[in-house]
Amino acid sequence: MSTSGSNLDINTVLEKSAKYRNWGKWGSEDELGSGNYVTAETIARAATLVKKGSVFSLALPLDSKGPMDGSFDRVNPIHLMMQDGGDIAAGGQDHLATLRYTDDSVYLVLQSSTQWDALSHIYHDGKMYNDYGLEMVTSQGAHKNSITNMKDRAVGRGVLLDIARYKGKKSLDVSEPISNEDLEGCAAAEGVEIGEGDFVLVRTGQMQQRRDAGSWGDFAGGPAPGLAISASDFFCPRHVTAVATDTWGTEVLPNETPDVFQPLHIIMLVNAGIYLGEMWDMEELAADCAADGVYEFMLVAPPLTVTGSVGSPVNPQAIK
């Protein structure tokens, strides 16, 4: 039975936050959280899942046609050419002997496309993961819990839970919650078990639905299917490293808690130290998994090493 409903409030969030809190589990100075579950052994086991040599990029293009509409001060990437063919033709590089070149730059909001949330991305009551305070994120960036801590840890066993297909839909309904029971049922139907150190991908089909509609609409922050609060009862006890979805904000929107915005971020990111990925494009991977019945693979998804960053674009690679 789903726990979604109007009876959920801040008390539910506080109870689950306390139940799944991992502050101090790996020491008072820890900044990895569930990244600690990634070991040489888990990576080596993940490598054995590569059978076909098929690689699926799960990233959206970084361009002006992305889903950002300015909400939360997030805009689509702006790509600029510093030197192009016109500069060469105009003689701007004639001072060079024979060689000519092109160069470019980009203005990139780090959470404007397929991305990881860092443990420093979300605060609750003035604290982020492992009891670090507000002073640990300044105008210079995150001094604790930056996503760069995962630069050599975002590798392991990936598992796709294709909730849309499990429910017999092209995409979930608007604001349809994904409960603990939904996740358990989908895993059982696919014949997979979720375990320690896993990277779990949850497909709602919303991204493809917006593609089919020909417009992103209110994809960025608008009503959306997504994980219910009870999803924490599936992921946290299994000690997963990360959970990624094909939606803007991971959670069902509007949230189940009128008095708390993005409650699952508080439970899983702030307290359990589980990384969250958003806007991952799972369509080609999902089609392949449905075709061969194999829903596990090696996932390689390191963040950019932008010092002090609280989130990062990523080009996740699912390798089967």
Image (cartoon, rainbow, N blue to C red):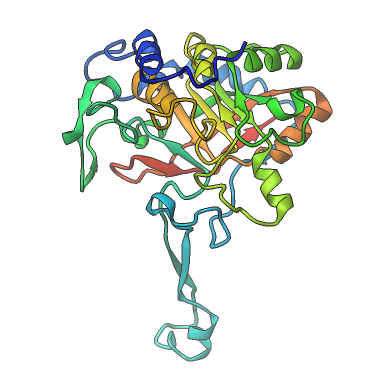
Residue drawn at x 20%, y 48% as measured from the top left: 139
Q: Is residue 151 left or right of residue 217?
A: left
Taking depth in this image into account, of 27 and 75 the one nearest to the observer is 75
Q: Position of residue 301 (x, y in %)?
A: 52, 36
Q: Eyeballing the image, is 70 above or below 261?
A: below
Residue drawn at x 73%, y 33% as measured from the top left: 286
Q: Eyeballing the image, is 78 above or below 274?
A: below
Q: Quadrant of the C terminus?
A: top right
Taking depth in this image into account, of 9 and 289 the one nearest to the observer is 9
Q: Position of residue 10 (x, y in %)?
A: 36, 20
Q: Is residue 215 left or right of residue 133?
A: right
Q: Is residue 18 left or right of residue 104?
A: left
Please count the marks in the image. Answer: 0
Residue drawn at x 52%, y 26% as measured from the top left: 243
State the image quarter where residue 136 is shown.
top left
Task: State the residue lying farthest toward the left.
Answer: 135
Q: Eyeballing the image, is 176 above or below 39?
A: below
Task: State the residue lying farthest toward the bottom.
Answer: 90
Residue drawn at x 69%, y 51% as measured from the top left: 211
Q: Eyeballing the image, is 95 above or below 251?
A: below
State the image quarter where residue 292 is shown.
top right
Residue 215 can be seen, yes or no: yes
